[in-house]
């Protein structure tokens, strides 16, 4: 009852006309920025800091929450239509969203993304409101050993979800971690794998690899398969409507992935990206038609989309209740709050209830705007597919270039992008899955940091990873996720 | 001597990469103060893991999906510059040229040249539509990035 009263108080703040306008503007601006490859929620939020500087803290955070949601959804449209995820959290959406678009079901994929984002966001807000303090305690009890085990589980889950060779999936993951640790080691200041180049001191940015491995490799692959020379028949956008059967089919995945996404988002470091991959992986395992994942299965769009939006909400838990940002995006949010003179933490609920509950209420409103704004725009957005194929391929190349250059202003990064595009093409031609490499790239640094911290605590004793019960359970699940598919295959072969 | 299959060739390449990676891991400088875990441990773990996985790949039989698709005979009959692999090579060279010319030429000129040139090379024959679309998109991106978002993009030879 108290939560309901507090929520009503929050709605009183969020429904002030100016705050409604801020939510609307935030969602709209976030969607547009998120659609541009290279500009994700972090850049979108960073761009908003100068605007929110002079605002009331509650209004400023309300605007930023809208931008955050919008950017994640915007990223899913470029994932689905162009296979060029604008945001890391929507990479998993492209696995089935893009094949759906190629089959003339772009409208349906975008509509599912909009509904799943809406429901994922809404369910997770309820969780945020009710169980935030409890969840934050659980997340805080995770030490470095548990974190390392969680990262290992995240990686093995993605490797095992690939329908390609398990060994090749693991190789892709190891290469991803290798790329992630290039540059200066932040703990010791030692250079690693920079080949003496100053450009590599800061490591390789995620975006360069993601755009290369996914978007550029896709362009090269289409060129190899004859996508250039002749004009392709135009893809139909297809209907936005879902049949009753389809609604029934995606209801379960959306519900499950929303809960999973929220819990993933609460854990520091494990945000929308890991949430979406885990949601996708879980649904692929649970589905009877798991084989059709990656080929345009509607559940493969619904699961990551609901999970990534839910994870966005989840990542507000440690930020609002502990003052600890769980991701790069919430770190920017924390910075913005500090600029506005608000220090998030356990006392915030008592000292600034207007900010806490105003933000939660504005999330409900932001979600509704997200749906209202994006559904009517889908036919317009999906017309990108009507472009003649040669023109589309060239434009994707330009989008990739501007995405990378606009972030790093480095010609070297453009050449790296080309290198990763060719690597992605090679991986595709020889059956190496790209998803484990991308996830490993995101997790690699955190994984190493957690492993080193844990080993430093134990004085170099590796048993720390199995002596801690949570870590042990997570590692056993990780091992099972690799062994079980192999055992199942062996059993099937023996029975045949 | 039996011919190596695609997985075995890849495994040998990856094993060489792993060995090179390990050799570099041993050259990582030690931290001046003694620590239980130093910067070289994780790379060594990764190098040995990749080496082990290369071995597993060597003994794994390639599946049908692991080999590049056979070239289309109709595509192979085209002039050399228009064949599928030539398209990839020319596009890659165009991207490299774009990267090197972006600053001296400026974003608008370099991007328009890349877009219009590649679209025409890929076989689109309506050159007016090509130029108008690419220039429109490039200008829209340029103005959004520079005027709205305050992101600097090189102007090059153009005055704006």
Image (spheres, coloured by chain):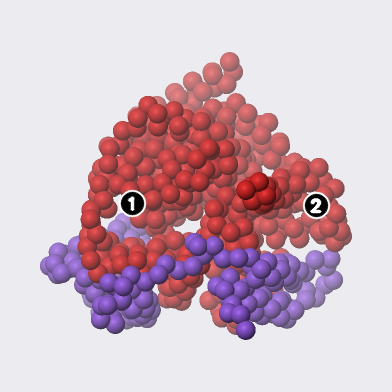
The chain holding disc 1 is: A
Residue occupying image coordinates x 24% and y 59%: A232
Q: Is residue A333 above or below residue A221?
A: above
Chain of the residue on which disc 2 is drawn: A
Helix, strand or loop under label 1? helix
Any part of residue A51 in sight: no
- Residue denoted by label 2: A465
Would you say A485 lies left or right of A96 here? right
Chain identifier, red in the render: A
In x, y percent, where is residue B118?
26, 73
Number of marks in picture: 2
Res A482 label: none
- Crowd around label 2: few <14 · some 14–19 · many ≥20 (10 Å): many
Label 1 Cα crowd, 10 Å radius (few <14 / some 14-19 / many 20+): many
Let me know if marks 1 and 2 both belong to one chain.
yes
Residue at the image position 68 percent from the left and 31 percent from the top = A134
Tell me the residue at 45%/24% (across/down): A11
Residue A386, position as x, y percentages in the image: 23, 53
Nearer to us of marks 1 and 2 is: 1
Q: Is mark 2 on a helix, strand or loop?
A: helix
Question: Looking at the picture, how far across and down is residue B53, in whole percent?
Answer: 67, 67
Judging depth in this view, the residue of A44 and A195 nearest the camera is A195
Report which quarter residue A182 is drawn in: bottom right
Q: Is tag 1's residue or tag 2's residue first in the polypeptide sequence?
A: 1
Q: In this view, does B24 lie above or below B122?
A: below
The residue furthest front is A496
Shown in purple, the chain is B
Quarter of the picture containing the N terminus of chain A is: top right
Residue to which mark 1 is pinned: A102
Mark-to-mark CA distance, 1 and 2: 45 Å
């Amino acid at each position: 009852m108290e939560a309901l009263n507090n929520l009503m108080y929050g709605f009183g703040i969020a429904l002030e006309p100016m705050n409604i306008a801020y939510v609307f503007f935030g969602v709209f601006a976030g969607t547009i920025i998120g659609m541009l490859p290279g500009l994700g929620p972090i850049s979108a939020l960073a761009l908003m800091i100068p605007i929110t500087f002079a605002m009331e803290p509650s209004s400023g955070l309300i605007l930023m929450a809208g931008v955050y949601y919008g950017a994640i959804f915007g990223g899913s449209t470029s994932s689905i239509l162009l296979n060029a995820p604008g945001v890391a959290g929507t990479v998993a959406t492209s696995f089935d969203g893009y094949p759906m678009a190629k089959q003339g079901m772009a409208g349906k994929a975008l509509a599912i993304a909009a509904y799943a984002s809406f429901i994922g966001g809404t369910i997770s807000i309820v969780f945020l409101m009710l169980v935030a303090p409890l969840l934050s305690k659980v997340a805080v009890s995770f030490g470095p050993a548990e974190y390392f085990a969680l990262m290992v589980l995240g990686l093995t889950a993605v490797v095992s979800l690939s329908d390609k060779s398990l060994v090749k999936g693991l190789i892709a993951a190891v290469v991803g971690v290798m790329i992630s640790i290039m540059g200066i080691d932040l703990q010791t200041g030692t250079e690693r794998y920079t080949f003496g180049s100053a450009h590599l001191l800061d490591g390789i940015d995620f975006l360069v690899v993601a755009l290369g491995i996914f978007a550029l490799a896709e362009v090269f692959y289409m060129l190899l398969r004859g996508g250039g020379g002749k004009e392709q028949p135009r893809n139909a956008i297809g209907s936005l409507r879902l049949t009753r059967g389809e609604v029934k089919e995606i209801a379960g995945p959306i519900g499950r992935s929303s809960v999973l996404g929220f819990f993933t988002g609460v854990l520091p470091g494990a945000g929308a990206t890991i949430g979406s991959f885990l949601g996708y992986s879980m649904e692929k395992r649970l589905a009877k038609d798991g084989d059709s994942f990656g080929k345009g299965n509607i559940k493969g769009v619904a699961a990551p989309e609901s999970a990534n939006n839910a994870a966005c909400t989840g990542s507000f838990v440690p930020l609002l209740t502990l003052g600890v940002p769980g991701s790069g995006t919430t770190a920017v949010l924390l910075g913005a709050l500090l600029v506005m003179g608000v220090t998030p933490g356990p006392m915030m609920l008592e000292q600034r209830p207007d900010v806490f509950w105003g933000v939660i209420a504005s999330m409900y409103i932001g979600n509704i705007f997200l749906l209202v704004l994006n559904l009517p725009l889908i036919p317009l957005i999906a017309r990108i597919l009507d472009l003649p194929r040669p023109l589309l391929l060239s434009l994707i190349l330009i989008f990739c270039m501007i995405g990378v250059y606009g972030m790093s202003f480095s010609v070297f990064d453009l050449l790296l992008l080309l290198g990763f595009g060719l690597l992605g093409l090679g991986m595709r031609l020889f059956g190496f899955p790209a998803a484990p490499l991308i996830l490993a790239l995101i997790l690699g640094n955190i994984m190493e940091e957690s492993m080193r911290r844990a080993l430093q605590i134990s004085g170099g004793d590796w048993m720390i990873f199995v002596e801690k019960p949570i870590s042990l359970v997570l590692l056993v699940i990780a091992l099972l996720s690799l062994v079980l598919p192999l055992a199942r295959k062996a059993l099937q072969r023996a029975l045949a | 001597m039996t011919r190596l299959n695609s997985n075995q060739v890849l495994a040998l390449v990856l094993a060489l990469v792993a060995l090179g990676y390990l050799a570099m891991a041993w050259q990582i400088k030690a931290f001046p103060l003694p620590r239980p875990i130093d910067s070289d441990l994780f790379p060594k773990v990764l190098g040995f893991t990749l080496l082990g996985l290369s071995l597993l790949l060597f003994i794994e039989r390639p599946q049908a999906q692991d080999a590049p698709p056979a070239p289309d005979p109709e595509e192979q009959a085209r002039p050399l510059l228009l064949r599928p692999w030539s398209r990839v090579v020319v596009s890659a060279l165009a991207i490299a040229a774009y990267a090197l010319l972006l600053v001296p030429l400026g974003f608008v000129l370099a991007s328009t040249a890349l877009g219009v040139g590649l679209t025409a090379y890929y076989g689109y024959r309506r050159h007016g539509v090509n130029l108008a679309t690419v220039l429109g998109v490039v200008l829209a991106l340029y103005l959004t990035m520079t005027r709205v978002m305050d992101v600097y993009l090189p102007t090059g030879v153009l005055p704006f």
